[in-house]
Image: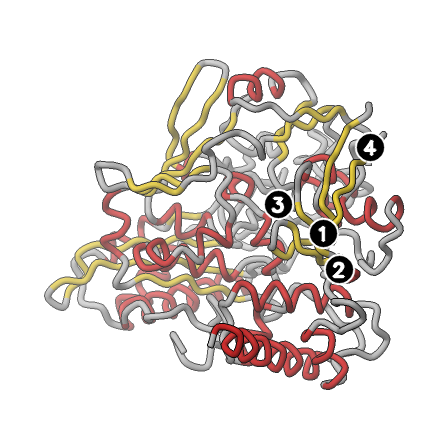
Amino acid sequence: MNLPLSLTINGVRRDITLDDPRVTLLDLLRERLDLTGTKKGCDRGQCGACTILVDGRRINSCLALAASHDGAEIVTIEGIGRGGELHPVQAAFIAHDGFQCGFCTPGQIMSGIGLIQEGQAGDDPERVRECMSGNLCRCGAYQGITEAVLEAQSNMTATKQRRSA
Amino acid sequence: MMNFDYVRPTNVADAIAAASEKGATYLASGTNLLDLMKGGVSRPSRLVDVTRLPGLDRIERLSDGSLRIGALARNADLAHDPEFARNYPAVAEALLSGASAQLRNAATVGGNLMQRTRCAYFYDAGSACNRRWPGAGCDALKGENRLHAVLGWSEGCIATHPSDFCVPLVALDAIVEIEGKAGRRELPLEALHRLPEATPDRETALERGDLIVALRLPTDAQDFAGHARYIKVRERTSYAFAVVSAAAALRIEDGRIREARLALGGVAAKPWRAREAEQVLAGAAPDAAVYREAARAALSDAKPSGDNAFKIELAQRIIVRALTLAAAGTPDRIAALPGSPFSSVAGA
């Protein structure tokens, strides 16, 4: 069966015809649209490597059927930098050594962006750790990840305040 | 994953018609269903995507004071709704103690009620499982079963129900609204999930085509808001299913427990309401001795289904902890580690 699908991916509208309803958002991005920044770790919703933003919310793209998301707005790791400039969360991950091998990093960064937008953790490291628990890092860079998310959040809040001042 | 036919109806009547065929199943966000399909555990021939059914994501206060939560409300949206968290704090805490932020952003209220057990033998299509394949036998009985049921199990199935959300809901007498071929009906949540007995494959009271459209918290559910907690022991502090959990909700007046609600998670194939314990607590002064007596009453029928006798003691201690914390008063803000007995400061 052919399923027509229209998605906005990183600001660009894409009209897609799916020939198989089993395709997840993750496989659509990686295998059909060549957006391989989003990683496939467990493919079962346990590791968070495939985290993307769908309509502004972080979800596991491995457990989302593409067909079910017709009309959605999707942001992946490829869509967060601006004209060669790093997103504040990306910059903070570098500054704080928030990774080692880097495989989980796109998912960590997208999850961190989602967390900051949700605004539930505040500046409490314990709440940040809890809200990032859906992203596993087998290199164990958690300390740096927590510091990076906290610093990025603080930088983004300061920038926003400067802009509105 | 076996191939399937995908349909996305735009009204409830069409959804029910499409799901009434043999082999059809409803798809909401799919966080549990797709996982099961990838493992070959669920093999639907048709997915009826209900995510576009209009109006089913609303949370509304009804004129009688009850709260109606549409089946498509997302777990995160419900838990972070300030009014909801204030009126039903144990439910919000349970929601936030479950899964990960990504999964809570996707998962729906109706889907949470319909999630399947996390028994490893149910999940492994190569193992014998009566729930998956009636008459096949149960590999969990002689397998790794330290996390399995201690209440209400049978020789045919010792699996537990994994939901956190359902535990305080069943304590608060939540009602499930169902649309089916014969129209609309209601069921207490407590009657939705079945104990295994001789037919573990019959997991719920739903018939083919039945669609959960809403969940309702009755008017008196918010009377417990001042003294309500959900406490959950896990094998890691976050992003893990309950080994044992307890929802405790008290109405305390003039230094006495006027009414108590208690339910357990991780101990049975359904969220387990502990009515004997509630009777022990009703009318008593809130103190450790009466909590221990209530805990004993709650587990009086428990027996190990394998290497899990520890759960009977653990459940009693968690009940005492949940009652103690509930009696001390609901914190202003849910703790940094929701539901965790290891939270450094309650409410901090």
Cα gap from disc 4 to disc 3, whole angstroms: 32 Å
- The residue where tag 2 is placed is A79
Q: CA distance from mark 2 to mark 3?
A: 37 Å
Are the residues tagged 4 and 2 within 8 Å (C-beta)? no
Protein chain holding label 2: A
Query: Which residue is rendered at x = 72% and y = 64% of the image?
Result: A80
Determine the residue positioned at 56% across, 24% down: B10
Residue tagged 4: A18
Same chain letter for marks 4 and 2: yes
Q: Nearer the viewer, mark 4 or mark 2?
A: 2
Name the front one of labels 2 and 3.
Answer: 2
Asked if the residue at tag 1 contacts the one at tag 2, i.e. Cβ–Cβ closer than 8 Å, the answer is: yes
Count of picture labels: 4
Residue type, label 2: Gly
Q: Earlier in the sequence, mark 4 or mark 2?
A: 4
Question: Marks 3 and 1, Cα distance to the nearest angstrom?
Answer: 39 Å
What amino acid type is highlighted by mark number 3? Thr
Are the residues under badges 4 and 1 in a single subunit?
yes
Amino acid found under the numbered disc labelled 4: Leu
Q: CA distance from mark 2 to mark 1?
A: 8 Å
Residue labelled with disc 3: B117
